[in-house]
Image: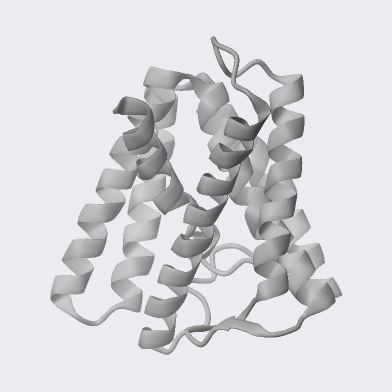
Amino acid sequence: MKKEFEKRILSSIILIPIALFFIIKGSLFFLFFLGIFFYTTSYEWVKMNKEGTLKIIGIIYLFIVSYSAYYLRENFGFKIFIFIITICIFTDIGGYIFGKLFKGPKLIKISPNKTYAGMIGGFILSMFAGSIYKENISIYSYQIENPEFLLIILLISAISQIGDLIISYFKRSAKVKDTGKLLPGHGGLLDRVDGIIFAVPISYLILTL
């Protein structure tokens, strides 16, 4: 656990500042970043799945994710976009730490490493991170009451965890542990954005409607 966790931390230290640069810069910079994201995740998806129809559906969905990410960032600003990403990241961290520490009953068969403790940990850490973010960075032009704000965090965290399980299902069906080997300690890029690719388009849809 220690070595894997150290690899995750090191990869995150390198990748997060790079991602933040492109997100904050926006416009063509972010479009270029999304192009790399779309190509890499599509490649991993195609390589993981053998069924042609499934490959095409996955690529179309990843394009929709990229489209949603671009317009979410451009129309609502980078603070909102980073807020959503932050919730997803800390949901993943909470799930990993709490799951490893407390173990306990398994959550679902399609993802044997997921536990109820990890699920609860994901919610707890995402609420903690989201609350700190809100207190230190102005992300809304109007006041949102705390109960409503916590519900938003819980919704994004829940969607992120469901997305994680969906990708786990496809990995299990393809009989692979990771979607790739791009990121040390993390696996493929799709492994790390499995929750984000579901949280971003749904958040964009909610904010737009």
- Quarter of the image for residue 153 reads top right
Residue furthest toward the top?
141
- Relative side of 186 to 4, left or right: left
- Relative side of 18 to 7, left or right: left
Q: Is residue 31 visible?
A: no
Q: Quadrant of the N terminus?
A: bottom right
* Image coords of residue 101 (percent x, y): 84, 74
- Quarter of the image for residue 53 reads bottom left
Report the number of numbered marks: 0
* Image coords of residue 125 (percent x, y): 74, 51
- Relative side of 185 to 202, left or right: right
Q: Quadrant of the C terminus?
A: top left
* Image coords of residue 205 (percent x, y): 32, 36
Q: Is residue 80 visible?
A: yes
- Quarter of the image for residue 87 reads top right
How has the structure been colored for display?
one colour
Give 127 or 145, whichever is nearer the viewer.
Answer: 145
* Image coords of residue 168 (percent x, y): 47, 75
Q: Residue at x 15, y 75 (%)?
A: 52
Give 24 or 90, whichever is nearer the viewer.
Answer: 90
Q: Residue at x 58, y 32 (%)?
A: 148
- Residue 38 higher or lower than 101, as above or below: above
Residue furthest toward the left?
53
Q: Residue at x 41, y 48 (%)?
A: 37
